[in-house]
Amino acid sequence: MISRFKLSIRNLYRTCSNLIAFYIVLLCLLLICGDIEPNPGPERTHEYSEKTLSIFHCNIRSLRNKLNYIADIIEDYDVVFFTETHLDSNITDYDISIMGFETPVRKDRNSHGGGIIMYFKNYVHIIRRQDLEHDEIESMWFELKTKLRSILININYRSERQSTVYFWQYFDQMLKNALDENNCIICLGDLNKNFMSDLPSNIRDIIFINGLINIIDKATHFDTRTSSSSLLDPILVTDSIPVLDKDTIPIDRGISDHDGTYVTIDCGFSKSRTYIRSIWDYKRGDYDLMKQKVLNTNWENLISDASDVHVAATNFTNTFINIASACIPTRDVTIRCDDKVWFDSNLRRETRKTGQISKNFYAFT
């Protein structure tokens, strides 16, 4: 009777031990998978993400020493603008390059104030339109070409010292010149005018007559001295711009006293490209060998000896991937994002054969 009881206790302990080990492995898998988000927000469909374009702006209050922070903020945007860059000719484009973006387009003032810069992804077809710009204000114009339309994008910085009257007169002139050729216009920037309060009649008239509306309804500037907030960074668009989303992006107050703003538009834009990816060839895997290697690995010590959960996850990841690499071969494949899910390599091969036969037939006849 006692021996049976000992046996049942031993089996129960073994079961609990295996269960604990299973939960530890499961936890590590969740930690390393990289796609578990505690607050994921609304799911974005493939169609939404592939056929939209997002534009971001922020008054950065000097760009040079904030590139690491900036790179994390802007990685999901297609076109990015910063005002008050505080750059001059001593700072090269290489000095302020950001991985994932092309060589920036700059309009510098000096290292003590002002300045505008634009970053863009390599799949974005955008050119500067200096013919639409005015020499008296800090402004740049760009033409963005998509599958559906051409869009004019305007970025501005108005210093507090600049005359409000003259700035808005010049701004009105630029808008009229732009509208003569295209009614799809987006204007961003720091205008140093609070759009949450009543605007002067001359500014309201310029915005209304040129068919612009402000789509940002939250404060973007936060004065720590007075604890006041204001909307100095509007996004003005014509009604022909198909806005899908817009909002402000919180920025660390140690980086800037402005929050960022963005707009996402539907324009038939496509980010799809062909690229090479290395994949696991699971059909050719030696799973008996893999099972043996997994059983021979001391997972408990591997995890318990770690100083914290991050080290444990790293140890687990490296060990598990090394085992998988030894047992499952890999191969490089070409990923074509525009292909339908059912259009595989076999169908592509047969399509090429059909095309070659058709070509030979017409050449013969």
Image (cartoon, helix red, strand yellow):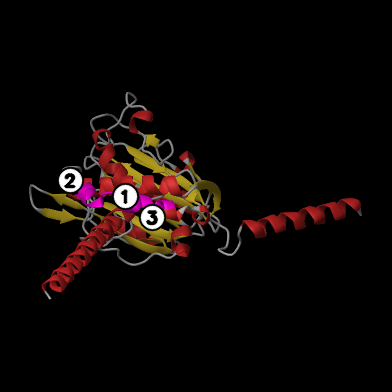
| Observer-nearest of 102 and 262 | 102
Residue 248 at x, y percent in the picture = 27, 57
| Observer-nearest of 269 and 107 | 269
**Outermost residue toward the bottom?**
1
Callout 2, which amino acid?
Asp
Question: Magenta residues, as a range?
Answer: 289-303
Residue 145 at x, y percent in the picture = 52, 50
Callout 3, which amino acid?
Lys
Q: Which residue is labeled 2 in the image? A: 305
Q: Label 3 vs label 2: CA separation?
A: 23 Å
**CA neighbours of label 3 inside 10 A, class few (<14), some (14 to 19), many (20+):** few
Q: Which residue is labeled 1 in the image? A: 296
Q: Label 1 vs label 2: CA separation?
A: 17 Å
Q: Check disc 2 and report its element: helix, strand or loop.
A: loop
Residue 165 at x, y percent in the picture = 28, 47
At horizontal 16% and vertical 43% (from top left) the residue drawn is 254
Q: Are marks 1 and 2 in contact (CB under 8 Å)?
A: no
Query: Sequence order check: which comes first, mark 1 or mark 2?
Result: 1
Magenta stretch contains residue 299? yes
Query: Sequence order check: which comes first, mark 3 or mark 1?
Result: 3
The quarter of the picture where the N terminus appears is bottom left
Q: Which residue is labeled 3 in the image? A: 291
